[in-house]
Amino acid sequence: MASPYEDGGHALELTPALMAQYGVDKNIVPAALDLARHNGKLYGIPVWVRPMTIFYKKSLFDKFGIPEPKTFDDLEQACAKLKANGITPIACGGKFSWMTMRTTDFLIEHFAGPGLHDKLFAMEASYSSPEVIKAFTKLKEWVDKGYFNDGFISLDPNESLPLLFQDKAAMTFQGPWIEDQNIIAAHQDPNDYVPIIAPADQKPVRVSGFQEQIQFWSKAKPDEQKAALLFASFVTTPDVAKKHVSEFGSPSAVVGVFPSADHPITTTMVKWLQSGVQLYLPTDQALPQEIVNAFFQAQDSMILGSLTPEAACAQIQKAVEDYKASH
Amino acid sequence: MATATIPAERISAGPKRSPSAKKRRDQLRFLPWVFLAPALVIYSVVVVYPMLFSAYLSFFRWDGVAPKKIFVGFQNYVVLLTHNEVFWIALKNNAIWLIAALLVPTSIGLGLALLLNSRFRGSHIFRSIFYFPAVLSLAVVGLIWTWIYHPDLGLANQLLDALGFKFLERHWLSDPQIAIYPVILAATWNAVGLPMLLFLAGLQTIPSELHEAAKVEGAGRLQRFWYVTFPLLRETTLIVLAITSINALKAYDIVYAMTNGGPANRTQLLSTWMYFLTYNYNEVGLGTAIAVVLFSLTLIFAIPYIRLMTRKV
């Protein structure tokens, strides 16, 4: 999302020399640095990493004897069993299109694999590839089977969560922020909402995610730039980050920093990151916004039945080609 | 007590115009401009200049932050008219919104004003109740109605179910064929208050003698409304229609709050699509081109309104 600022020369590039000088190379987890790079260059110091994945409600899964999904087949079987028992498998708020996109991205990761998925983001592969069409077809199949809540396409993500709280839905595709903002705030037990590595059945193991970073204005005065770099370097020092993790938020991008014990969701996600689980960017952060617009339009139109999966993929690919032709 | 006497020649010929008085009057002629200057400068900087700059940007391809803007002439307008499907959806939605706004809240507002114009016990309370939604911001109205339309937890479907009209239940905001209408209904709830208030003010300026005279002549209720009330509300009606039209074209926040322009952009208005293209999708040229189109459409209603409001009596 920051790419226009980086391409426009507004953000300071953190060269390897600057990274070493300010300890960025040793203090920040590699997955966060990988996500932050744009065209191979780093333009900021990552502060948080936000993985996005499937959460399931443990008490509901236990009630119906459904095991935690480890594979894509497990996930589909869980959806079928939940639906058969009158529970909406996946609570989704698709009003802004990006929450639906998380499922679409997961299905692309499953059918296309990390290699092709990354090539799509680099605009080196076609969205009309059979693998992507399969992913869109599967999404439509899940919609038609009623695996998402009624009218999800126009619901705010926050309007979909009460369905989980009221045992009307059993899973959702979310990030670690719901632990504080929604689950604890609604006096729910965070231990009942378990994040799992969304089972794409691919190697390397990846989940969707993004990082948030501190960037520096390239045209600021040198002493102001230096002060900003020193501040960012200070707050991403492991000792400082550990001391202030509860105020500063998590999952931290800093090596060895874990959230407090009363945050089981975030703790699980930090363990993934520190143990080498990789992240892929969500489509709306990986592609230029002009193409994201076409992606959302095609995805939602297909869900509403006004486009076939093939036509939806062709529409996205056309936007990619138009973008490449005009840039 | 001393009295001032006016010479007869000054009464017949008016005040004498001495050269110094003329000079003074010439100086005073510029005085209003001096007083207006600060407001004019601020208005020019924060309103006129951004408007002209927006129109200028509509001739470029630009992402909003890149150092270079690429001049493309009228291409953004051509793209909008020939390639941008959502622009036409938004234009159609604006037309539906405008027609609905001219017919529904104005008629309800007039009806309520007629009812509340008669003095009865508690009429002030009813005026406040009916005006209350107009006090709320459209973003708040949007949030309230979004929950009312919630497919599973919302009042609308649960009420229909309880009343035995389950077959009428809908996914109100996610059905692309109808989604714009529930949004218009929510906006109508908010929009009734202003016309009601304006009509009420207009009704109270009509002398009761006219109604009494018409009554004596044997005119019924409907005839009195048609031949006495309505003609005397002409000016108020024009103001109400002009304000309603301008507000309808300006509608933005309620769509943003309720549907975010979806599903699949089916509830976009020109204003929201302008915003999305400019700020979400980095298409500043296309977004500002929509701004120019929207501004031109608004002028159709704004010019007669401004002329009416500034007309010398």
Image (cartoon, rainbow, N blue to C red):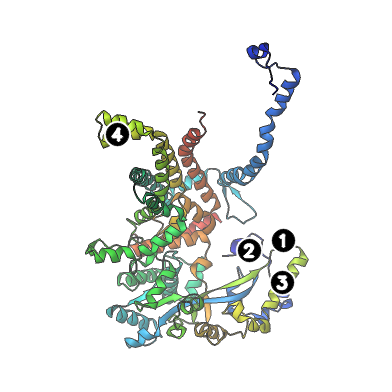
Question: Which label belongs to residue A229?
Answer: 3
Q: Position of residue A66 (x, y in %)?
A: 34, 86
Q: Which residue is mark 1?
A: A219
Horizontal relation, residue A152 to residue A290: left or right: left
Q: Three-letter amino acid code at disc 1? A: Lys
Determine the CA span between mark 2 and mark 3: 17 Å
Q: Secondary structure at mark 3?
A: helix
Q: Are marks 3 and 4 on the same chain?
A: no
The residue positioned farthest toward the left in the image shown: B164
Closer-to-camera residue (B227/A166): B227
Classify mark 4: helix, strand or loop: helix
Query: Residue B224, labelled with which disc?
Result: 4
Look at the picture and state if A34 lies above or below B84: below
Q: Residue at x 33, y 74 (%)?
A: A147
Query: Going by the image, does B276 lie left or right of B43?
Result: left
Q: Residue furthest right?
A: A223
